[in-house]
Image: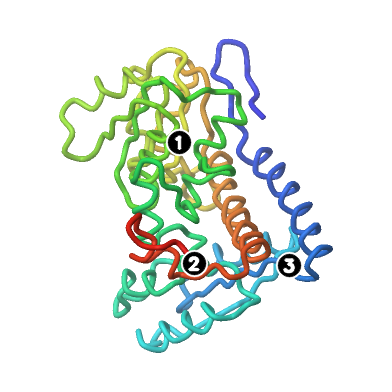
Amino acid sequence: MASQSEGQAKIIDGKTIAQTIRSEIAEEVHHLSQKYGKVPGLAVVIVGSRKDSQSYVSMKRKACAEVGIKSVDIDLPENVSLDDLIAKVHELNVNPDVHGILVQLPLPRHINEEKVLSEISIEKDVDGFHPLNIGKLAMKGREPLFLPCTPKARHSSNGCLELLSRSGISIAGKKAVVVGRSNIVGLPVSLLLLKANATVTIVHSNTSDPETIIREADIIIAAAGQAMMIKGSWIKPGAAIIDVGTNAVDDSSKKSGYRLVGDVDFQEACKVAGWITPVPGGVGPMTVAMLLENTLDGAKRVGTVPELTFEVFSLKSRSDAPFNP
């Protein structure tokens, strides 16, 4: 899972780890098919024709096919109304063949993304962005139904944490610094690290002297969206680095005219760190694998607890109310 050249950090191979997870998922999907005569279903909703979004959606649909998950393709025009999009989400919420719903972001400017995401059933929120899922993630002793895919990993870990776990890197008791505080990566991964008993610090755009803070970290999760901002001199010797950043920088030697780099200066970091993910080929492949895992989990949950409803997660599940799912 991790390779190493002499005098350099071990490279955490996200492609290999993700492929291993996909194989495990395919085996479980086959088991569900044999036991229940059905396979998990993932509805991927895309609005408009952005080339990057089309590419991402195509990749997700192909990944579904590879592991035996049914892909329900919903392609809507750029000018679709908010009401029509929400109506489609509601339709998918009650479709028994759909166990996960993903609305590809970004949406057109006239669409309220928050409103759309909040309408997805918590039981099918495979992106992990429903307020109730995030709220449970933030509470001690509570477990969300789904975790966001980039941070997520199997068994209540996350994509970033899964890379650490499968590379033999322990988290409990370590000093972890998360660079960035986005709702997609920074915030949820910091909460997951806390649940894994790390001591967590978040570095953001208003943090004073980020270099000093980062240098104290045993684990660095870089998710700021700033090309190569973290230099080798900022890194504690032997630290583990998960680089979530994907930034395009000019490169005349490439046919495209650019190359992709992370938030960490990879060449410098390799000389200091103990472990590091490359960009590309590190976190990226894990995100899709975790989406498939979430969809599988949703289907397994329906198979074992068919009467589960949203009401279980409403105010009726307070300790002073009867728990009767």
Q: Earlier in the sequence, mark 2 or mark 3?
A: 3
In the picture, measured across the screen, residue 300 lies left or right of residue 117, that is: right
User: Is disc 2 placed on a helix, strand or loop?
Assistant: helix
In 3D space, how far apart are the residues under numbered discs 1 and 3 (Cα atoms)?
Answer: 34 Å
Q: Are marks 2 and 3 in contact (CB under 8 Å)?
A: no
Q: Quadrant of the N terminus?
A: top right
How far across and down, in percent of the image, does residue 291 sit?
A: 57, 56
Q: Nearer the viewer, residue 284 or 134?
A: 134
- Give the amino acid at mark 3: Val
Q: Earlier in the sequence, mark 1 or mark 3?
A: 3
Q: Are marks 2 and 1 in contact (CB under 8 Å)?
A: no
Q: Which residue is mark 3?
A: 39
In the picture, measured across the screen, residue 46 lies left or right of residue 247, that is: right
How far across and down, in percent of the image, does residue 302 sit?
A: 63, 66
- Give the amino acid at mark 1: Asp
How far across and down, in percent of the image, does residue 14 sit?
A: 60, 38
Q: Quadrant of residue 199?
A: top left
| Residue 154 higher or lower than 272, as above or below | below
In the picture, measured across the screen, residue 313 lies left or right of residue 13, that is: left
Q: Which residue is mark 2?
A: 53
Residue 243 tag number: 1
User: Is disc 3 placed on a helix, strand or loop?
Assistant: loop
